[in-house]
Image: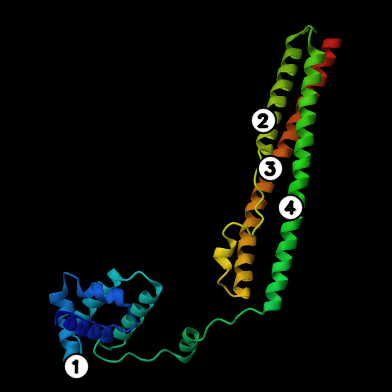
């Protein structure tokens, strides 16, 4: 008997607040303010009378506090607009304008499969080009790291056993050593192995896309490739900037080392 009464109250409340989800309506029925505003609204709705304005405003406030989904919030906006226009919760609400009604009822058009294939092909080509840049940068980093280690070792060998004639020469050699160590540290940081994102990943691919339509699978794959491309580009730009910084520091270290060694020979 109690369940039947609750269901009747739920139906009345649904007529008073059209568009709200069942979850929000059930929360209103269990609200501590039920005997006051919500009880009065249910009584008016059950007897076919308009809900008083102050009661309607209180019910809408309570419903707003319980709603969190976009659909519920839009329904409450329509109810508030209905009340502002002079309507009450006991009166039918006006129909949506034709353009809004068609926008809600008509599904979004499906993208053309040929266009989706074209976009997917272009995205994969862009990812392949990015992979070539990645490999080229790895080669440059290896060369720069080997060259810097060799040059640093050669300068140390040439400087062993030589006296430092003055404080200026000491400063030149100390500055050269500082910039060489800085360049080496930046290069090592840039050379730290990073994984190149190249979707789709074999693990989990079938579970994610097997039950989707071919067109939907391709669209999701395009989104995944776009995110991977952006992430790869951020890493690529960061490593390129570090390589440039290392080259500049190494050039300064080389100039200082040449000046310092020249002064020791003189």
- The answer to whether residue 244 shows anywhere in this view is yes
Whether the residues at callouts 2 and 3 have beta carbons within 8 Å, the answer is no
Picture residue at 75% right of the left edge, 62% below the top = 125
Picture residue at 20% right of the left edge, 75% below the top = 29
Give the camera-side residue of 6 and 202: 202
Q: Which mark is residue 186?
A: none
> Which class describes the residues within 10 Å of circle 3: few (<14), some (14-19), or many (20+)?
many
Picture residue at 17% right of the left edge, 77% below the top = 37
Q: Can you say whether 63 is above or below 183 in the image?
A: below
Q: Which residue is mark 1?
A: 48
Q: Which mark is residue 185?
A: 2
N-terminal of the two: label 2 or label 1? 1
> Which class describes the residues within 10 Å of circle 1: few (<14), some (14-19), or many (20+)?
few
Q: Which mark is residue 239?
A: 3
N-terminal of the two: label 3 or label 4? 4
**Quadrant in the picture for residue 14:** bottom left
Label 4, label 2: how many angstroms apart (C-alpha)? 25 Å
Camera-side mark, 1 or 4: 4
Q: Secondary structure at mark 4?
A: helix
N-terminal of the two: label 3 or label 1? 1
Picture residue at 66% right of the left edge, 80% below the top = 112
Q: Position of residue 203 (x, y in %)?
A: 59, 56
Q: Secondary structure at mark 1?
A: loop
N-terminal of the two: label 1 or label 4? 1
**Quadrant in the picture for residue 117:** bottom right
> Which class describes the residues within 10 Å of circle 2: few (<14), some (14-19), or many (20+)?
some
Q: Which residue is mark 4?
A: 131
Label 3, label 1: how many angstroms apart (C-alpha)? 72 Å
Q: Secondary structure at mark 2?
A: helix
């Amino acid at each position: 008997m109690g369940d039947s009464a609750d269901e009747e109250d739920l139906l009345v409340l649904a007529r008073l607040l059209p568009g709200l989800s069942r979850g929000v309506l059930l929360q209103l029925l269990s609200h501590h303010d039920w005997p006051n505003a919500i009880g009065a609204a249910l009584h008016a709705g059950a007897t076919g009378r308009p809900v008083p304005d102050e009661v309607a405003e209180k019910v809408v406030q309570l419903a707003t506090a319980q709603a969190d989904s976009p659909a519920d919030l839009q329904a409450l906006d329509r109810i508030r607009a209905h009340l502002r226009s002079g309507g009450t919760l006991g009166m039918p609400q006006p129909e949506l304008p034709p353009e809004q009604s068609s926008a809600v009822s008509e599904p979004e058009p499906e993208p053309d499969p040929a266009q989706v294939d074209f976009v997917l092909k272009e995205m994969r080509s862009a990812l392949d080009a990015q992979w070539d840049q990645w490999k080229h940068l790895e080669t440059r980093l290896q060369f720069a790291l080997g060259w810097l280690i060799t040059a640093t070792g050669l300068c140390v060998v040439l400087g062993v056993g030589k006296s430092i004639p003055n404080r200026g020469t000491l400063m030149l050699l100390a500055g050269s050593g500082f910039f060489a160590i800085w360049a080496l540290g930046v290069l090592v940081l840039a050379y730290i192995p990073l994984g190149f994102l190249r979707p789709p990943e074999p693990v989990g691919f079938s579970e994610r896309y097997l039950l989707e339509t071919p067109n939907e699978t391709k669209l999701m794959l395009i989104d995944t490739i776009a995110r991977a491309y952006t992430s790869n580009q951020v890493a690529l730009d960061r490593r390129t900037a570090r390589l440039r910084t290392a080259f500049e520091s190494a050039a300064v270290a080389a100039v200082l080392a040449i000046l310092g060694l020249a002064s020791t020979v003189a």
